[in-house]
Amino acid sequence: AQVDKAGYKHFMAKEIAEQPTVLQGALAHYINADGTAVTLPEPGIDFTQIERLTLVACGTAYYACMVAKYWFEQIARLPVEIDVASEFRYREPPVTPGTVALFVSQSGETADTLAALRYMEGKADKILSVVNVPESSIARESDLALPILAGTEIGVASTKAFTCQLTTLAILALKAAQARGHMDEDALAEKLAGLRALPGIMNLALQIESRTDQLATKLAEARDILFLGRGAMYPLAHEGALKLKEISYIHAEAYASGELKHGPIALVDKHVPVIVMAPRDALFDKTISNMQEVMARGGKVLLITDAEGAKEAGEGVWETILMPEIDPFLAPILYALPAQLLAYHTAVAKGTDVDQPRNLAKSVTVE
Ligand code: G6P
């Protein structure tokens, strides 16, 4: 069916706004009606037999893999390796017994990701994929394809596919944690309830849109922007920088907050906005102290956190975006929204072609 903008100025705006709805559909697909169990398509996955998970993708899908690494390692105690497909396919990685490979792709047709999948054929115990297009080559060549159910995504800069990829991977990590004996039924039910509440919290979070619109006029003047995060927010910093580069053409870089002092702090001055993604998780205090190092050097910090976090962060922050409170496990999904909205409004402020940015393609089917 033909997809239109449904009254939005761009497909990207429509796709950002759609996230609570499509996410709800994805959750209903994998979580049973009473919210206590995860159901995967046949033949399922036996997580007790897995020694190592290899996650491979490109672009935004790669950042979804990067978040998933934190999840699988932390809650399922499963060693995870990640790589971008263009590197993975040529570095001839040795594959040890018990390895399961998982490929994440919105289109299911990205040439490098497909080639990486074919490299793993006959080497990995199983090939899984997390895709938006169930008829795609990557889906067809996998032993098990998990749909993300984001619906057609038109904007070249991926938004709803990213949050649906994350949601599917979070559900998979919970399933793995339970199967491997690291999460009991009650804890699983609690996490699943948190996931099911996420579309509602996302709707609340979308109210930051007018705030991101205001801030965008300031960001649009910057030549360089730094994004900082720690733990599972580090990949989100990458995703924020990628979105901004793709559609506003402003140079943006992501750094793990703790690496700041090993280089990028040399870039900090009053002209460089530094966007700090800091939900109140176990690493919050450390992120805040990195933020203060930036401020001590005259850097302009845009802090993204919740009300309590903003209070704890104290004075001297340039600008703040206030997010709803969220279980740190789910923060990477929720904090995708400010990353997307800041990029979107900055691009609109600069007058770029948001849905069709220069030099980029929605799906890269050649090497
Ligand atoms: C292109 C798109 C990105 C996407 C990447 C991977 O670069 O512009 O938005 O993240 O390809 O695409 P895939 O379809 O494999 O997720």
Image (tube, rainbow, N blue to C red):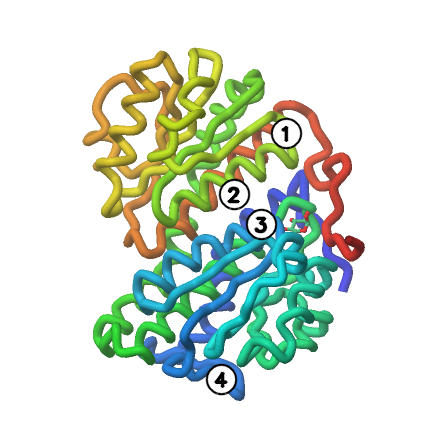
**SS state under label 3:** helix
- Give residue 188's position: percent from left, percent from top: 28, 72
Task: Work out how far the residue at label 3 is from the one at label 2, CA to CA, in angstroms.
Answer: 6 Å
The quarter of the displayed image where residue 85 is located: bottom right
Give the residue at x 73% y 54%.
Answer: 363
Q: Is the residue indicated by label 1 positioned so its CB lies within 8 Å of ligand 1?
A: no
Dots 3 and 2: beta carbons under 8 Å? yes
Q: Is label 3's Cβ within 8 Å of ligand 1? A: yes
The answer to which of marks 3 and 2 sits earlier in the sequence is: 3
Give amino acid for label 2: Glu
Q: Which residue is mark 3?
A: 60
The residue labelled by disc 1 is 248
Number of residues whose C-alpha sits closer than 10 Å to that of mark 4, classed few (under 14), some (14–19) or many (20 or more):
few
What residue is rendered at 25% in x and 36% in y?
286
Above/below status of 213 relative to 59: above
Return the disc, 4 or 1, that comes first in the chain's sequence. 4
Q: Residue at x 23, y 71 (%)?
A: 187
Q: Residues within 10 Å of mark 2 (few under 14, many from 20)?
A: many
Q: Nearer the viewer, mark 4 or mark 1?
A: 4
Do we see residue 239 in this rendering? Answer: yes
Label 3 packing within 10 angstroms: few (<14), some (14-19), many (20+): many
The local secondary structure at tag 1 comes to helix
Q: Is mark 2 within 8 Å of ligand 1?
A: no
Q: Counting residues from the N terminus, which is met first, the one under dot 1 or under dot 2?
A: 2
Near-viewer residue (354 or 115): 115
Q: Which mark is residue 44?
A: 4
Give the CA distance from mark 4 to mark 1.
41 Å
Question: Which numbered mark, 3 or 1, is in the foreground of this view?
Answer: 3
Q: Are marks 4 and 3 in contact (CB under 8 Å)?
A: no
Contact (CB < 8 A) between labels 2 and 4?
A: no
